[in-house]
Image: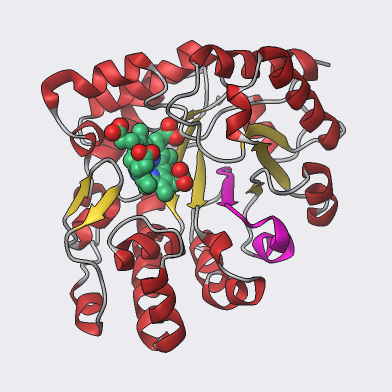
Amino acid sequence: MSKQYDFIKACWCQPVDRVPVWLMRQAGRYLQCYKDVRAQGGGTFLDLCKDPARAAEVTIQPIDILDVDAAIMFSDILTPIEPMGMALDFVPGPVFEKPIRTAADVEALILPDDMALAVPYVPAIIKRLRIAFEGRVPLIGFGGAPFTLACYMVEGKGSKDFAELKKMMYSDFPLYDALMQKITEMDRRYLNMQIDAGAQTIQIFDTWGGLLAPHDFERYILPYAKQLINGLKRDGIPVIYFVKGGGGMLELVKEAGADVIGLDWHVNLGKARDILGDKIAVQGNLDPTVLYAPKPYIEQEVQRILNENADRPGFIFNLGHGILPTVPPENAIHMVECVHRLSQK
Ligand code: CP3
């Protein structure tokens, strides 16, 4: 018998007694206890991702501290790219030693048959966390969307506009398509492996999807996102699709077929719900910098978002992007407490 978690019920647009809440990037540097575990052994960020005992520990920290309604396994969207044959470093932003630029580069990318063997530490952390959490909170697995992964693989590092990928996309579509097909298939195997290992929800991060105009999103992102989501073992497993900057093209984002749409703070949540209709859940969308505001201001902002949702079922409170590393933890605790108290029926 699996417990009926409010978070999962909200993903399926079922009624709940109070709005569930979690924070993107809830395990991380704003918590001193994260920095302590990260420093143990003097290893790198990737070493932490690859150590299931320590990675599980930092996943659990925000559950104990913040009282959130879901856990997200500790890892990074780029960890499954390493076994495709691309050496990866974090400084702290990600850097690929040899970015993808040519047909030979795409050809040379490895597509592992068994992702559980390619990144054994991922199913190991999921199994550990399911045992640690049983009956307490559901576990979210995640991956990068094909486009966002391609941004880093082609640029080789973070960027404001990811011009290298856009150059490839506009000037050599067959090459772009070959790369995206390979990434999409890796992603499908990777996320299904997480479901097999015990992930109870999957979130797909399309952090850079909002870089494209709506008609380009439709042509260069949507077919792959749709193919990926269609290929997931979704029987009872909700899929969340978060497109940062997607607020102006929600009809297209919806077409990808996810059960829940993640929203950033550039869109009014009520208007987004009107566009998306009542069969699809939403997650969001507090500006992460509001967590620097005084506590009464945070409470007002939580109330404003709850008002925009207007009691509609299918709502998960979250930030509109990841929590920032210099946020005082007590403000994040306060935000979660406000969501629970102000939404309690
Ligand atoms: O949400 C969680 O608590 C789980 C952990 C998680 C991390 N990265 C840990 C991390 C998740 C879900 C991610 C996703 C991720 N990683 C995304 C998509 C979400 C988003 O924020 O847009 C992206 C684009 C990445 C790539 C990435 N990883 C970048 C750009 C950086 C550097 C920027 C930064 O935050 O420092 C990372 C490093 C990273 N990933 C850290 C953490 C805790 C910091 C590394 C450290 O501890 O030194």
Tell me residue 72's x, y (percent): 45, 32
Tell me residue 1's x, y (percent): 55, 24
- Report if residue 196 is visible in the image: no
Res 293 → quadrant: top right
Give me the residue at 61% from left, 63% from top.
Answer: 256
Left or right: 329, with 190 as reference point: right
Tell me residue 47's x, y (percent): 18, 35
Res 160 → quadrant: bottom left
Q: Is residue 238 magenta?
A: yes
Quadrant including the C terminus? top right
Q: Is residue 291 magenta?
A: no
Q: How many marks?
A: 0
Give me the residue at 65% from left, 61% from top.
Answer: 253
Left or right: 15, with 50 as reference point: right
| Nearer the observer, 281 or 196 | 281
Res 173 → quadrant: bottom left
| Nearer the observer, 244 or 50 | 244
The answer to whether 16 is drawn above or below residue 253 in the figure is: above
Residue bounds of the magenta highlight: 236-255
